[in-house]
Amino acid sequence: MKRRNFLRHLETQGCTLLREGANHSVYVNRGAGKVSTVPRHREVNDFLAAKICSDLQIPKP
């Protein structure tokens, strides 16, 4: 899945960008109090996207 599309999914689910790192972006779901990192690659593996969504307690894309 393209990173841009995945980030759009995270933001529509209510997650916000906490900070940018050198290799990862950190997103937070403030409603659930959960934090997860998203790698800064063009493609995000589908299994990794599902894992990030489960960490943030949001539905899978």
Image (cartoon, rainbow, N blue to C red):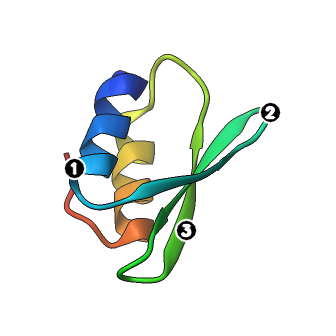
Q: Residues within 10 Å of mark 2 (few under 14, many from 20)?
A: few
Quadrant where the image shows the C terminus: top left
Query: What residue appears at the point 35 percent right and 21 percent down from the top-left corner?
Result: 2
Above/below status of 2 relative to 10: above
Query: Left or right: 48 with respect to 39?
Result: left
Q: Position of residue 16 (x, y in %)?
A: 44, 56
Q: Position of residue 60 (x, y in %)?
A: 22, 54
Q: Position of residue 36 (x, y in %)?
A: 55, 60
Circle 1 sits on which residue?
A: 12
Point out the tag, 2 or 1, that comes first from the N-terminus. 1
Query: Left or right: 43 with respect to 23?
Result: left
Disc 3 residue type?
Val
Circle 3 sits on which residue?
A: 35
Disc 2 residue type?
Ala
Disc 1 residue type?
Thr
Quadrant where the image shows the N terminus: top left
Near-viewer residue (12 or 51): 12
**Disc 3 to disc 1, how far (Cα)?**
16 Å
